[in-house]
Amino acid sequence: MASDRIEALKAAMAAELGKVDFVLGYARGFDPLHATPVTVRTEKDLAKLIFDPTCVQNLATSLYGLRGKRLGVVVKGCDSRSVIQLVQEGLWERENLVIFGLPCNGVLDLAKVRVKADITSVRSVVFEGEGPDGLENRTVRLLLPGGEKLLPLRDVLADKCLRCRYPNPLIHDHMIGEELEPQGAEDTYADVAAFEKLSTQERFDFWKRQMSRCIRCYACRNACPLCVCKHVCLADSREPHWLSAEATLQEKWLFQVMHALHLAGRCTECGECQRSCPMGIPILLLKRKMNKELKEIFGYEAGVSTEAVPPLHTFLMEEDKIKDRGLLW
């Protein structure tokens, strides 16, 4: 039961409160469909805690800016990969982090919910059929002014959840709840492969349409847990001056391409960049393209093992799938 899991989470946090500065968790947001990050400092704060499919945020995004503290953090499976990557790169000290892992069957995509109901008028939300048995019998019951609306949970989950192979946190100090079976099969990057089948002109026209809507708010950058050089970002740097402040298609496209390249071998596909985009631009597709290449060439997947070394952090004279010896330069 969800209530049992929350009580177990509260008990685990209560045991750690005196050992950390605070714990990052989830509380109810401004309406029933939104959760918000919350800092738990005292036992009184424990009453605010929730965990359900509205808890979409990746709390690992806040970690780099809080270096120097000893923290606790609640993570889902996908979030735990970001924590692993931060630890791998020396951007956070493992000994200064207490991780509360919660198995997750998926989080809501409000864009999908919005198609099926007026989310501004939702008075309450009930998630039914929770448990380790997958998504087949799980539903979302929305209370609206005109009555109730029942939606299959699978129909309103984020796309990343439908292909998720890591529903259980891969790194944790406290595991809260029963572990789950993965909902997705091996990720074949079918979406990327389908896009690659388009002609060069079709792909170019697609991204021109998408980037024409970009307002350069940098929400994608700010929401990314691995994009940690915000204070010296090429988008803001004036020495050297990489990008102008002009809202031209060329400048927008250059920023997004550089952003994707800087995350090559690092992106854990948490989807925060795309979720935070106010213009609905499918920028996760760029990161997935980079991950597809890294997986095919190096057999590497970011944020899966603390022992693994990202391939772009190493140099080998000979790579198994890169045959460059004997090339004429």
Image: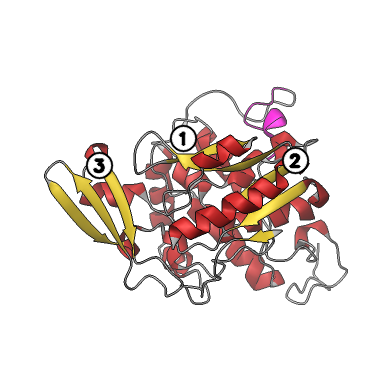
The label shown at residue 249 is 1
Q: Residues within 10 Å of mark 3 (few under 14, many from 20)?
A: some
Q: Identify the magenta region.
A: 228-238
**Above or below, 277 relative to 163:** above
Q: Which of these two is toward me, 12 or 264?
A: 12
Percent position of residue 318, x then y: 84, 73
**Considering only order in the chain, which callout, 3 or 1, is on the residue closer to the N terminus?**
3
Percent position of residue 299, x then y: 69, 73
Q: Return the residue at label 2.
A: 18
Q: Residues within 10 Å of mark 1 (few under 14, many from 20)?
A: some
Give the SS element for disc 3. Answer: loop
Q: Which of these two is toward me, 211 or 21?
A: 21
Assess whether residue 235 is covered by the magenta stretch: yes
For the C terminus, the quadrant is bottom right
Q: Amino acid at mark 1?
A: Leu
**Considering only order in the chain, which callout, 3 or 2, is on the residue closer to the N terminus?**
2
- Res 129 → quadrant: bottom left
- Is residue 79 in sight in this rendering? yes
Q: Is residue 316 left or right of residue 180?
A: right
Q: Amino acid at mark 3?
A: Val
Q: Return the residue at label 3.
A: 122
